[in-house]
Amino acid sequence: MKKFTAPWVTSNILQEIEASLNKLLIQLLQLCSVEQFYLLMNQLIIQDLEVTNIWEGQDRTVQSAVTLLQLLILCPLKEDIERMVWCCIPQVTTALVMLIREACQDQSLVSTVTVPVLQTLATLVKQGEGIIRNPHHVTLVFGALLTIPLEQLKTDKYYTVFLAYHEVLFSVLQYHPKVMLKAAPSFLNCFHRLVVSIIHEGQQKGERAKGSSSDFKFVIKCAQLVERMYTHIAAKTEEFTIFSSFMVSQYVNELQKVTVHPEVKKHLTEGIYHILDLCIDRDVKFLNTSLQMGVREVFKDLYESYNHYHKTKKQGEEKYTS
């Protein structure tokens, strides 16, 4: 694994050899005793995930450990070794969260630390379905996400960070429903950062405008991810109905600040329509009376288009399928 710390080993190279590494790791683990595995886990993963490695400029060592950890989580393991892995997960999760918080202070660590750690957290959360019993070990990821910088990134890096961030949230939403029953506000705080980010990245005017840029395809992909997330949130009615007017309010308040490119706005609008589906008449009245003047106009336009383009179509589909 120390070979992975070489300067010429990029994230793309690691992805290309991932399948071969996975096969090699499976063969190694089949021959491992529990004692040997403990040494491997401690020396090649836990020690190398320590935040002191970043302080000492050893970000490649961290990347190596994160790569091995992700492969390990996905490997078929013997029962006793699998039990040991998941017993270590609380310690590992805490280490990953600390790494993210530290790496976020240096944009040069986006590719080697921030994105790989986010990807590994998403994998860990998915594979931990039904295994991670303590909700705290899942909600720890929200604190890490709130520290992720989504501003002042080049578009290609912005997309990789956005995608990895989104996948962590999506993994929690899909695989840990019991956690979501209590942690919905924390989840929404993290998701709102993605919404704000893509609204500002998708500006039609101003310094950040990318409408004519070849990088604009990445902005559109991010907008599509936000639309998809809104759709999945709306499907979790038990957890999110009570927050529907709050989500709409956050959205229109942010939308009022900038002029968003039509292609970006189209995806965001299609997404927020699904949240409006959760709003009852009382919520709509509340929004009409509580929003400030300029924001209220944005909401009225949104609600009119919702009734015209989405609600009517949805009611027609329900009538057709009933």
Image (cartoon, helix red, strand yellow):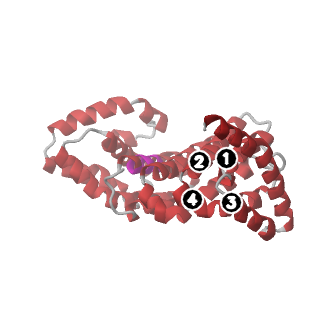
Q: Which residue is mark 2?
A: 229
Residue 315, percent across and down? Answer: 70, 43
Q: Is residue 210 above or below residue 238?
A: above
Residue at left 66%, top 39%? Answer: 319
Task: Name the foreground residue: 78 vs 210.
Answer: 78
Q: Which mark is residue 240?
A: 4
Task: Name the foreground residue: 295 vs 52.
Answer: 295
Left or right relative to 34: residue 260: right
The type of residue carrying mark 4 is: Phe
The type of residue carrying mark 1 is: Gly
Spatial distance from mark 2 to mark 1, Cα to Cα?
A: 8 Å
Q: Which residue is mark 1?
A: 271
The type of residue carrying mark 3 is: Ile
Whether the residues at callouts 3 and 4 have beta carbons within 8 Å, the answer is: no
Q: Tag 4: Cα neighbours inside 10 Å, few (<14), some, or many (≥20)?
A: many
Whether the residues at callouts 1 and 3 have beta carbons within 8 Å, the answer is: no
